[in-house]
Image: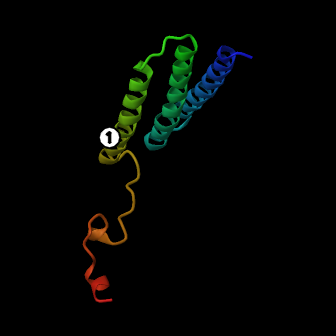
């Protein structure tokens, strides 16, 4: 078994895994009703699915002897922008009150700072 045949098997495996994740993401996008639950399927699953498809492309380009760095740049751009866009979509849905507002934090005004509440300073 040559390296080219093993590379072809890895390409096929990556394509199957990637398209499976993309299919699950598409079904989740169509099946969920709430915008916040609908947001989860394409951002999380789609990122992994597209990542596997790009891995298949990288392996195939090395397999045929013409390595390319374009796939790595696409992957970096995808992994940087997908969480940011998901965060913006979630904030828009919360601002429009299209979903339930999360409960307030336990410690009120000190939950996101380094300030220690007065009650805990004395102990």
Quarter holding residue 25: top right
Q: Nearer the viewer, residue 107 or 6?
A: 6
Q: Nearer the viewer, residue 119 or 98?
A: 119
93 versus 58 height, above or below: below
Relative side of 7 to 119, left or right? right
Image quadrant occupied by the N terminus: top right
Image quadrant occupied by the C terminus: bottom left
Say which residue label 1 marks: 88
Q: Residue at x 58, y 31 (%)?
A: 21
Relative side of 98 to 46, left or right? left
Q: Nearer the viewer, residue 98 or 27?
A: 27
Q: How many marks?
A: 1
2 versus 105 height, above or below: above
Furthest toward the right, the residue is: 1
Q: Residue at x 50, y 31 (%)?
A: 46
Give the percent coordinates (x, y) of residue 48.
52, 33
Q: Nearer the viewer, residue 4 or 120?
A: 4
Categorize mark 1 by other alpha carbons within 10 Å: few (<14), some (14-19), many (20+): few
Give the percent coordinates (x, y) of residue 44.
49, 38
Furthest toward the front, the residue is: 2
Relative side of 74 to 45, left or right? left
Relative side of 22 to 120, left or right? right
Furthest toward the bottom, the residue is: 122
């Amino acid at each position: 078994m040559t390296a080219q045949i093993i590379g072809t098997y890895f390409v096929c495996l990556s394509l199957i895994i990637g398209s499976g994740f993309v299919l699950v993401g598409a079904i989740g996008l169509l099946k969920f009703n709430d915008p916040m639950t609908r947001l989860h399927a394409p951002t999380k699953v789609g990122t992994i699915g597209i990542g596997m498809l790009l891995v298949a492309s990288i392996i195939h380009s090395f397999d045929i002897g013409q390595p390319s760095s374009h796939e790595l740049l696409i992957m970096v751009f995808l992994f940087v922008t997908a969480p940011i866009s998901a965060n913006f979509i979630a904030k828009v849905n919360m601002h429009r009150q299209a979903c339930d507002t999360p409960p307030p934090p336990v410690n009120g005004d000190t939950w996101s700072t380094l300030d220690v509440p007065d009650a805990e300073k004395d102990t």
